[in-house]
Amino acid sequence: GAPWYLDCDTGIDDALTLGLLVAEGADLKGIGSVSGNLSAAGGARNTLDLMALMGRPDVPVAVGAHDPLDDVFHGVADFVHGANGIGGVELPHVGEPVAESAAEMLVRLAHEHPGALRVLAIGPLTNLALALRLDPDLPSLVADVVIMGGAAQVPGNVSAVAEANIWNDPIAAQAVFDAAWPVTMVGLDVTMLARFEETHRVDLASSGASGAALAAMLGVYFEYYTPVLGRPSCALHDPLAAAIALGTVVPTSAPVVPIEVDTTGGPGHGQTLVDLRSRFIGYPPQPGLRHRVVLEVPEGFGDALLEALSRLP
Ligand code: BDR
Ligand code: CA
């Protein structure tokens, strides 16, 4: 299969995503961490510990950017993911991060696998933007970029219009959309509708050791989402983006459109401006576009995710 670089802020739904990628046998060449749900250092620790638990201690993990471009780390989202990012679950500490930074790792892997590297980014986009600064040729070396982030036609989750991963570093997100690589944006339009229900969590708890640990983490995540969604359940943001990247979920609507980010510092700061005018009669599609936004996916992703995670050791 294709070589993969994953960039994440591990986080409870990031943890589920590691599980999905491992269960599906993705050829992970390296994982970079970035500050978002928690610090980049804390995210790398969680990633190492989870990968060891899931039987993949061999995958190199690099610590990425602590601060967003032109800003400082906004602090741990402990009300969503718990103080340690993984719902208070304590895992044995296994291994150490590699010496290179996440941005350096991404650039190196792109050169080692020219034209083939798949990039999946499920946290703020700081490392990808730094990698673009390190090597302006990066877009021609990467096969594609799939991101979890933004909101095209629905409200945000940190402000009226901004989704967390974009809001945490809008300048980096704009750089990623400006670069000449194809980006698939998987935003709140579809991720808020992809759910784990209480039955999924209970079934996961009685699968292997990895599944049990992930189910334990979901306690905190469910606490946050239950009042938001109106019943014991959670949204599956990052895992859905991974499934779309893997091809196990095929979007039923994903138009190619212009995407920009509001970096003005005003009330729209961090909003993704997804230009859907070509979907309306009278507006011709614009030539030269590279990015697609996922607007609809089939139902039933929670069941598919449970099935995959239940196969973990
Ligand atoms: C995104 O923000 C983080 O809290 C999640 O891990 C996900 O990547 C959802 O807005
Ligand atoms: Ca994330």
Image (tube, rainbow, N blue to C red):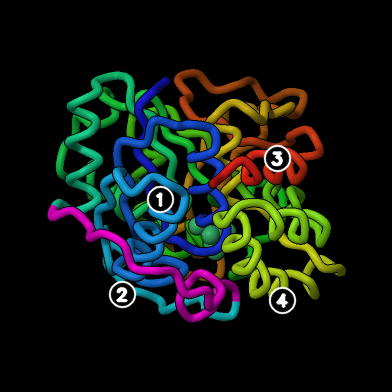
Q: Quadrant of the N terminus?
A: top left
Along the polypeptide, which appears first: circle 4 or circle 2? 2
Mark 1–mark 4 Cα distance, whole angstroms, equals 29 Å
Q: Which residue is mark 1?
A: 173
Along the polypeptide, which appears first: circle 2 or circle 1? 2
Q: Position of residue 104 (x, y in %)?
A: 17, 45
Along the polypeptide, which appears first: circle 3 or circle 4? 4
Mark 3–mark 1 Cα distance, whole angstroms, equals 33 Å
Q: Which mark is residue 307?
A: 3
Q: Amino acid at mark 3?
A: Glu
Residue mark closest to the camera, 2 vs 3: 3
Quarter of the view holding residue 76: bottom left
Residue 162 visible in the current orientation: no
Q: Which residue is mark 2?
A: 72
Q: Amino acid at mark 4?
A: Glu
Q: Amino acid at mark 2?
A: Val
Look at the numbered discs 3 and 1 and tell me whether their residues touch, using CB distance below 8 Å: no
Residue mark closest to the camera, 3 vs 1: 3
98 inside magenta stretch = yes
Mark 4–mark 2 Cα distance, whole angstroms, equals 28 Å
- Compared with 63, 226 (above or below) is below
Quarter of the view holding residue 27: top left
Q: Which residue is mark 4?
A: 223
